[in-house]
Image (spheres, rainbow, N blue to C red):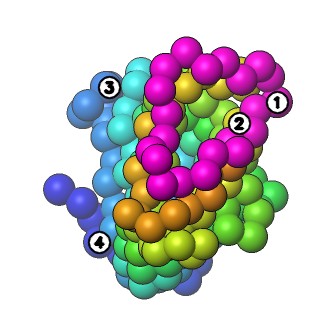
Amino acid sequence: TAVHTDTAGTITLSTGGVAGAGDIQIVEAQALNTSRVVLATDGSEQLVSITSTAGGITVDGNLGNSTDDLILIATAGDIEGGAGTLTANDLTLDASAGGIGLLTPVSTNTSGTLTLISGAAAGLGNISVSEVNALATSRLSVATDVSEQLVTLASAGTFTVDAGLGNATDDLS
């Protein structure tokens, strides 16, 4: 069950539970900057899910670690890049009413599946992500609105096309 929060300051999320017993799920009633989130989890894999219901999420501070799975959901705005990097085993970015990285690409550091979901129409649902590791299309899942979006995927390492990606409507870059 998610913990509902309505904060303007720092959100400290800490768990000592092992594996699923240490999962964290919050629903924040304000727009969220990742620099406001302090996260500490057990050394085993946890699922950390953070939802913002009143605005977007800005990645202006580093968040996550290479062991945990991280889900960021903006139900009423965009997920924007900034000075931070999102680190996770599996990472899901869900801007169900907006886009991802419209102004600044979202920086990611993943080793597992990278799931990108945008829900806004046309250019407002565009996606732009910059991965610090090698990236293969078999690690990607992209879902967009039925209208045409631009999906821009960059990798600091190699980019391998080893599986199908995208749809006939969107433009991939």
- Tell me the distance, in whole angstroms, between the alpha carbons under discs 2 and 3: 28 Å
121 or 90: nearer the viewer? 121
Which three-letter amino acid code belongs to the residue tagged 2? Glu
- Where residue 75 sits, quadrant-wise, is bottom left
SS state under label 3: loop
- x, y percentage for residue 127? 60, 57
Name the quarter where the N terminus is drawn: bottom left
* Disc marking residue 131: 2
Residue underneath mark 3:
18
Q: Give 32 or 147, whichever is nearer the viewer.
A: 147
Mark 4 or mark 2: which comes first in sequence?
4
**Considering the numbered disc 2 on the image, is that residue within a helix, a strand or a loop?**
strand
* Residue located at (63% from left, 45% from top): 172
Residue under label 1, please give it: 156
Q: Which of marks 4 and 3 is nearer the N terminus?
A: 4
Q: How crowded is mark 3: few (under 14 residues within 10 Å), some or many (20 or more)?
A: some
Q: Which mark is residue 84?
A: none
Q: Of discs 4 and 3, which sits in the foreground?
A: 4
Residues rendered magenta in the picture: 153-173
Asked if the residue under mark 1 is in contact with the one under mark 2, i.e. CB atoms within 8 Å, the reply is yes
Query: Residue 32: horizontal and vertical position, in percent?
Result: 55, 72
Q: Looking at numbered disc 3 in the image, what kind of residue is underneath it? A: Val
Question: Which tag is nearer the camera, tag 1 or tag 3?
Answer: 1
Crowd tier of the residue under label 2, counting other residues whose Cα lies within 10 Å: few below 14, some 14–19, many 20 or above:
many
- Would residue 123 appear left or right of 71 to someone viewing this image? right
